[in-house]
Each structure stands twice: as structure tokens, then as C-alpha cells.
């Protein structure tokens, strides 16, 4: 373990011997950092926070800070971060609130570019990309392989399904189904994220099925419940995993989907 002499580390931390901490960092009580993680410089990490393996935290990031939500009264809430994430310059991540489950969670393999924000009680999956200055409000759920463009904002309690894509400067106030591409302010659906699906090695047969389902939802002019019935028939015939992801992301919506 290498810790620069200018950094301040609480004696109530648990840091693996392989962790590197650069200059002018502050790591507070109840922080756990697993092997291979690097905290480069000028970063602040507050607990209770658990950070997994092989993460990189760049300068001026604030990880595990109290939420500014007015209902937060200093309760003992948590932040849990998985493995292989990159937190670029000035990223902010807040812990949860007891009014939800008391925890903010970030999975594995995520890239959070400069000045992005993850608010309290958010659930972020794996292999997502947040471009510069993107931010998600409290209680937001982000699936896997999601791309959020620069300067985009997601309203509290919204959900972004797997492989969805938000263009630059998008303002999202309703749920975005899996594979769906949205843009503009306010957000509107502009198509299917076919490029993202192909890049992530989804089989062409599955992409074709999702395209059919997308047209049922967005092109046929049916009521949502009638569209889902047609998709259920298609799913029963094919038993396709990726089609099921699309269907379930719509059925699970609590705010209503962008349509």
C-alpha cells in the first residue's frame, strides 16, 4: 500500500495493502477499499462506504458524501461500489437515505466521466457510461450497458433499461425501456439503440425480434396493454432472453414509459 504523506486517512478504515492513495486525499471513518484500487489525488471518500477491486478515483471526486436531500438527518446510510469502475475528475456520489433502502449502489465496469453525479438511493448496474456532466437524481435505477450523454439529467424515481441510450443534453422525466434511444429536452424516443446492441454482441436474431417488439410499442398506435399482449405472444413463440428484457423493462415501469 502506498499512501502519500499529505493524505489524511482515518484509523477506522479498512484498506487493502495493494491500494494506492495519492496526495491530498481524505478518507474518513467506515470506508472499506479492496485490492487494486487507486485514489489518485485530492479526492474525498466518506463512509459508510465499501469500494471493491480495481477501481480508479480521479482528482477532486467526492465519494460517499451525505445527500443534500432535506429529509436526510445524518442517519447511518451506505454507499456500495463494485469492481473495475472509473470515476473521472470531479465525480460526486452520495449515500442513501432511510426513506428508501438506505443505500446507493454502483455495480461493475462503469465509466463516470468528469463532473457526473450519482444521487442518493440510486441503483446503477454494470458497464454503463456517463458522459461529462450527466447527472441522475435520487432513487433512479440505471440498468446495464446504458449510455447517458453529456449534460443529460434524469428525474428522480426514473428507470433506464438495459442498453438504452440518452443523447447529449437530454432531460428524462419518465422511464426509458431497454434498448430505446432518447434525445432532446424534454426527452423523446428517437429509435432503437441498434448500434449499442450490435457492439455488445447481441445476436442478430434477437435484435430483429426486439425491432419487431419496438414497432409494436411505438409504431402500431395500440394501447400499451394491447401492445404488451402482442409482445407476450412473440415471446412465447421465441423464448428470447433479450426480447424478455425489453418486455420486462416496460412492465416494471412505475412512472410510465416515454412513448
Image (cartoon, rainbow, N blue to C red):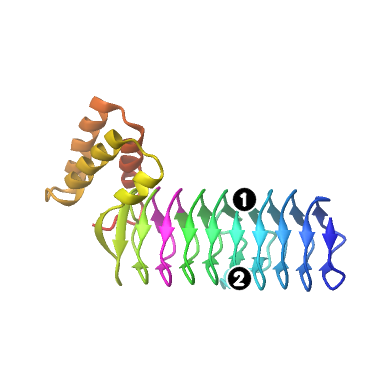
Q: Residue at x 59, y 68 (%)?
A: 91
Q: Residue at x 12, y 48 (%)?
A: 220
- With 77 as the anchor, is 203 left or right in this view? left
Give x and y (percent) for residue 97. Answer: 59, 61
Q: In this rendering, does residue 50 appear at all?
A: yes
Range of the magenta residues?
Answer: 142-162
145 versus 41 height, above or below: above
Give x and y (percent) for residue 118. Answer: 54, 64
Quadrant of the frame with the C terminus = bottom left
Q: Residue at x 39, y 49 (%)?
A: 163
Answer whether residue 160 is magenta in the image. Answer: yes
Label disc, if present, on residue 84 of the rendered structure: 1
Q: In this rendering, does residue 252 appear at all?
A: no
Viewer-side residue, 63 vs 77: 63
Answer whether residue 234 is magenta in the image. Answer: no
Which residue matches tag 2?
89
75 versus 217 height, above or below: below
**Is the residue under label 1 in contact with that under label 2 (CB below 8 Å)?**
no
Amino acid at each position: 500500500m502506498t499512501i502519500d504523506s499529505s493524505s489524511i486517512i482515518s484509523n477506522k478504515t479498512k484498506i487493502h495493502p495493494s491500494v494506492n492513495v495519492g496526495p491530498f486525499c481524505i478518507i474518513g471513518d467506515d470506508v472499506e477499499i479492496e485490492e487494486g484500487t487507486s485514489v489518485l489525488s485530492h479526492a474525498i471518500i466518506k463512509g459508510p462506504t465499501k469500494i471493491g477491486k480495481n477501481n480508479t478515483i480521479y482528482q477532486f471526486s467526492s465519494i460517499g458524501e451525505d445527500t443534500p436531500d432535506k429529509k436526510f438527518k445524518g442517519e447511518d446510510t451506505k454507499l456500495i461500489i463494485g469492481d473495475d469502475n472509473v470515476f473521472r475528475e470531479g465525480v460526486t456520489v452520495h449515500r442513501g437515505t432511510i426513506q428508501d433502502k438506505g443505500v446507493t449502489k454502483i455495480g461493475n465496469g462503469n465509466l463516470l466521466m468528469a463532473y457526473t453525479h450519482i444521487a442518493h438511493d440510486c441503483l446503477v448496474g454494470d458497464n454503463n457510461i456517463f458522459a461529462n456532466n450527466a447527472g441522475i437524481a435520487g432513487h433512479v435505477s440505471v440498468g446495464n450497458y446504458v449510455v447517458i450523454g453529456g449534460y443529460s439529467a434524469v428525474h428522480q424515481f426514473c428507470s433506464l433499461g438495459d442498453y438504452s441510450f440518452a443523447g447529449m443534453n437530454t432531460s428524462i422525466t419518465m422511464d426509458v425501456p431497454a434498448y430505446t434511444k432518447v434525445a432532446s429536452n424534454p426527452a423523446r424516443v428517437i429509435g432503437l439503440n441498434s448500434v449499442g446492441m450490435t457492439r455488445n454482441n447481441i445476436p442478430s436474431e434477437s435484435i430483429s425480434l426486439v425491432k419487431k417488439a419496438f414497432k409494436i410499442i411505438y409504431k402500431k398506435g395500440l394501447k400499451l396493454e394491447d401492445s404488451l399482449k402482442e409482445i407476450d405472444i412473440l415471446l412465447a413463440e421465441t423464448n428470447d432472453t433479450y426480447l424478455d428484457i425489453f418486455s420486462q423493462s416496460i412492465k416494471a415501469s412505475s412512472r410510465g414509459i416515454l412513448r
